Image (tube, rainbow, N blue to C red):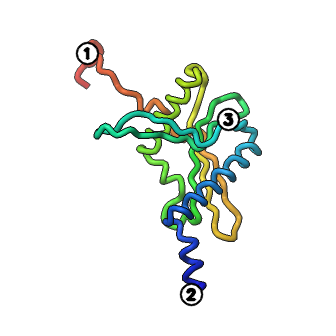
Amino acid sequence: MAMLRSILELNPSDPTNSSKLGRHGEALAADFLVRNRYRLVISNFKVPVGRNSKGVQISGEIDIVALDESGILCFVEVKTRTAAIFAGPISAVDLRKQRQITRTAKVYKRVFGLWDTPSRFDVVTIVAPTGGDAKIELFRGFWNADKFRKRRWDRDTDHGF
């Protein structure tokens, strides 16, 4: 019975365990960023970013906002896993997640009047096996906000391509 309990306690699909793992990963990521000369600005920045197709209010969250050593504003997504057997944590930063963070970063820049401040989107991945050392990786500029800009059609320059 003790063996069964310990397996259940480590179940990453349990919401309480996954949120504990996420908080632990964010703390590891913050320490890692500070050691790599980032200045932390805020963590868990959460704001409403719009409404979905059914009219329901949706929120966006950015795990960490920091300034790198050159003064670039970095919106950092942190993904933590206990193992990378099937897919690494980076695979969870899909287009939907990137779009959500991009929208949230746009609100952040608008709220604080930072339109002209150069920024980028970084990802910190952490594989933290139970009882082992965590492996932390930083992916600078993992995506660019330009890919989510609305395209405008200009019929004067459209040549049927």
Q: Residue at x 50, y 29 (%)?
A: 107
- At mark 2, the secondary structure is loop
Residue at mark 2 to residue at mark 1: CA–CA distance: 70 Å
Instruction: State the residue position of label 2.
Output: 1
Foreground mark, 2 or 1, reads 2
Image quarter of the N terminus: bottom right
Q: Residue at x 58, y 37 (%)?
A: 75
Amino acid type, label 2: Met
Q: Position of residue 117 (x, y in %)?
A: 61, 23
Residue position for label 3: 41
Which residue, as the protein is rendered here, is positioned at the far bottom? 1
Residue 24 picture quarter: bottom right
Identify the residue at horizontal 72%, vertical 36% (top origin): 39
Nearer to us of marks 2 and 3 is 2
Q: In the rendered view of the protein, which quadrant contains the C terminus?
A: top left
Give percent across and percent down for residue 123. 58, 45
Residue type at mark 1 is: Arg
Side (left or right) of 147 relative to 155:
right
- 133 relative to 125 in the view: left or right: right
Q: Are marks 1 and 3 in contact (CB under 8 Å)?
A: no
Q: Mark 1 and mark 3: span between their CA atoms?
A: 43 Å
Could you tell which of marks 1 and 3 lies nearer the N-terminus?
Answer: 3
Q: Is residue 91 above or below residue 66?
A: below
First along the sequence among labels 2 and 3: 2
Where residue 135 sits, quadrant-wise, is bottom right
Residue pictured at 60% horizontal, 85% vertical: 2
- The residue that mark 1 highlights is 155
